[in-house]
Image (cartoon, grey):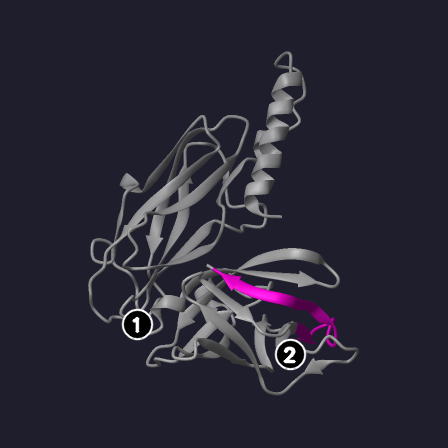
Amino acid sequence: MKLKKIILHITYLILISSLFSCGEQDEQLFNDKDAFFAFENSAIASSENSEDIISIPLYLAKSQALGDVRFGVVTEGYDNPAIEGVDYNFITTEYTVSFNGMYHASIDIELINNNEIDGDKRFKLVLDSNTIGASHGMANGDNSEFEITIIDDEHPLAPILGSYTLHWDSPWNGNDLEEENQIFSVEGSSTEVDIVLGYYRDHGDFAQCTKVRGVVDMDALTLSIAVDQETYNDGTHALTLYGDDEEPGGVITEGSIIADIDIDKGEIIFRTPFAIAFTAGPNEGYYEDLYLNPVLRK
């Protein structure tokens, strides 16, 4: 369940609680000791030449949405970090987000196009202190950090780099499924990309997740991904990408998965299904899912 849906359910619960609470001694359905605030998602990628403001949603689950949340900027650990004032500016001032009765707010950022080939740059927002009396992130600590990738628009693959939503149908989990994925450039290459693909993540930051390597042909507008590449590895469990012909035992362990790129629509359309299977851990030998009709959409 997406964070926004979770917040909507909690907000509904808070409203119902307030309607049926007649006095201070009435028991409230939502306990403020469980209050938290969190980012809606964990990452975004945008081209440095974008004129759109990057608006990063922040949601609060509490009976009263009043108070301030401070956030910090982290660049340690990045080989090519983004620099405030050079690569981006905050519209949200003083590293503070204020909640004034609404249960959602945003951190707004504008990007700076430097007209130089200097590679993709990254930085991270981390939720810090607050005057609300709420915990940072969800119960498991998720969504307390948010990573921004600024795509170098002078890179030859700039039109296909960035954040995507993977859409697919599943024979077991239903249709119209979706999950955030991301395509990164590969340093020193004008044809290769690294792709966070599928549902599971082995790290909170997309940049540090296990990725599959793909090759882009900008003349043919195709993306080729060799099968038998790991998509996840936490040291105990591992998942691996394969092809699948939808026949019993139809796993394809050699060759490549081909997708067609539509730059105008912002879509990467896979020609055939693919599978992601457990190749280590207690579920070894089983599919995590079979991705039918898969499409990456910006």
Q: Main secondary structure of the magenta part?
A: strand
What's under tag 2, amino acid-wise?
Gly
Q: Which picture quadrant has residue 50? A: bottom left
Determine the secondary structure under disc 1. Answer: loop
Q: What segment carries the magenta color? A: 276-297
Asked if one can make out residue 195 in the rendered structure from this viewpoint, the answer is yes
Residue most extreme to the top: 23
Query: Compared with residue 259, is residue 47 higher up or lower down, i.e. above or below?
Result: above
- Label 1 CA crowd tier, 10 Å (few <14, some 14–19, many 20+): some
Q: In this picture, is 207 found above or below 257?
A: above
What's the residue type where badge 1 is placed?
A: His
Q: Residue furthest right?
A: 248
Q: Secondary structure at mark 2?
A: strand
Indicate the position of residue 278 as horizontal and vertical percent values: 68, 73
Which residue is most to the bottom?
254
Residue 155: mark in rendering:
1
In percent of the image, x 64 and y 23: which residue is there?
16
Counting from the top left corner in percent of width and height, residue 41 is at 49, 51
Image position, residue 286 (x, y; %): 74, 73
Give the left or right position of residue 156, taking residue 65 as reference. Answer: left
The image shows residue 279, relative to residue 122, as above or below, that is below
- Residue 124: name its quadrant: bottom left
Q: Verify CB contact (< 8 Å) between mark 2 and mark 1.
A: no
Quick check: 226 above or below 145?
Answer: below
User: Which residue matches tag 2?
Assistant: 243
279 within the magenta span: yes
Inspect this view and state whether residue 236 appears: no
Residue at left 70%, top 63%?
Answer: 170
Residue found at x 71% / y 57%: 174
| Residue 122 in the figure: left or right of residue 289 | left
